[in-house]
Amino acid sequence: MKTSVMISKNIHQRAFDIFKEHNILTSVLKTKESLMDECQKHQALICMLSDTIDESFLKANSHLKAIANYAVGYNNIDLAYCKKLKIPVSNTPDVLTNATAELAFSLLLACSRHLKSALHNAELGQWKAWEPLGFLGRELHGQTLGVIGFGRIGQAFAKLCHQAFNMKVVYTAKTEKDFTWAQRVKHAELMQNSDIISLHCPLNQDTYKLLNKQSFQMMQKQPIVINTARGEVIDQEALVEALQENQIYAAGLDVTTPEPLPREHPLYLAPNVLITPHIGSATESARSAMAEICAKNIIAGLRGQALPQSLY
Ligand code: NAP
Ligand code: GLV
Ligand code: GLV
């Protein structure tokens, strides 16, 4: 029997080219098929962040020789159970760091200058004259940036802000880092002193609703909040309230709870909330490199070798 890999959505061509070179068959899940059922016919899986790889899925697919997540975040996978079943798992670190940091930067710039409303104004024919008092925004130069989760993406984003706008950078992380240009502070201090708060931590038990009602109440500078991490890191009901009470200036969200966010959700109506459909890593080069990493990890797993980007 020829080896074959299940891929839960059509991904960048790079992966298919690599599998072809190695004489490995691939099958992309069709819309009406069940991933749990289809996986049983294949030896390995490339899954998306939107696939829930939990205990019941794994029990039904304990034969898998490797699982490659087409994402760096892996909160969709029960890693402990994979470990128990000895199924190796990989993710796609590093190659999407710049893409995601740049998207966070885009959201920040758009939030600071009311781009959503300004674009609508021009497009809808409401631009009648140059307005001395229209669309007054905030300048970013010299502001204090608070980064929650100072890992690969958090650092890359902070560097952009520090270099472009001479921002002061403070952060929270699990462990101390050694940077001259960024200072580790306590959660409360970050909430109180930041003009901008950007989330870059993984979603896990410690970070679930990390930004909640109390956090919003601690904010003193009416910050711009950027989330390119995971929707569940913010208590979204508390965010809606914080916007109503003007505790924050604007929010730029690439991730929400749930995804997709239903069309009628109040967050879409707020002029100072910008929502993008989870496109952090959506650049040609990042997605190609992610496909390459997934293919290489799957091939290693099929050969019984250690995965280069192994998660445990
Ligand atoms: P990473 O390098 O592992 O960085 C994560 C950072 O979060 C680490 O510095 C970690 O601290 C810190 N952290 C963990 N728990 C924390 C807590 N309770 N409070 C504060 N900080 C905490 O990961 P990455 O590559 O930067 O990716 C970060 C996340 O971004 C991913 O997990 C994913 O969910 C999200 N993401 C989203 C997109 C998108 O399309 N929007 C794209 C890529 C990634 P230590 O260093 O001390 O361990
Ligand atoms: C995207 O959200 C990722 O985790 O790669
Ligand atoms: C604006 O366009 C200016 O010239 O100040």
Image (cartoon, grey):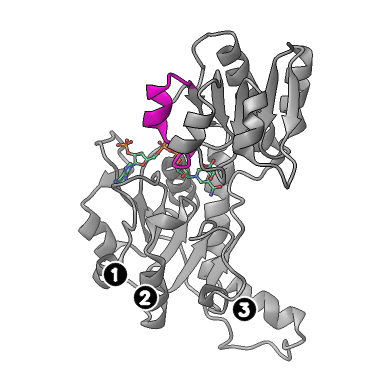
In the rendered image, which residue does mark 3 sit on?
117
Where in the figure is residue 277, as x and y percent of width and height? 61, 58
Residue 216: in magenta span: no
Q: Is residue 308 visible?
A: yes
Mark 3 / mark 1, whichever is N-terminal:
3
Q: Which residues are magenta?
A: 73-88
Question: Given the image, on which type of amino acid does mark 2 rest?
Answer: Ala
Q: Within 10 Å of the Cα at label 1, are there few (<14), some (14-19), or many (20+) other Cα atoms? A: some
Please provide percent x and percent y for residue 201.
38, 45
Report helix, strand or loop for mark 2. Answer: helix
Q: Please state which of the two labelled residues, at mark 2 or mark 3, is closer to the viewer.
A: 2
The image position of residue 232, as x and y in percent, is: 41, 56
- Tell whether position 80 is magenta: yes
Circle 3: residue type? Ser
| Residue 220 picture quarter | bottom left
Q: Amino acid at mark 1?
A: Lys
The residue labelled by disc 1 is 213
Q: Secondary structure of the magenta portion, mostly?
A: loop
Residue contact between numbered discs 1 and 2, judged by CB atoms under 8 Å: yes
Q: Which residue is mark 2?
A: 242
Residue at point 78%, 17% (across, down)? 20
Examine the rendered structure and indicate whether residue 273 appears above or below residue 98. Answer: below
Sequence-first tag of 2 and 3? 3
The residue that appears at 65% across and 41% down in the rendered structure is: 34
Mark closest to the chain's N terminus, 1 or 2: 1
Q: Secondary structure at mark 1?
A: helix
Alpha-carbon neighbours of circle 3 within 10 Å: few (<14), some, or many (≥20)?
some
Quadrant of the frame with the C terminus: top left
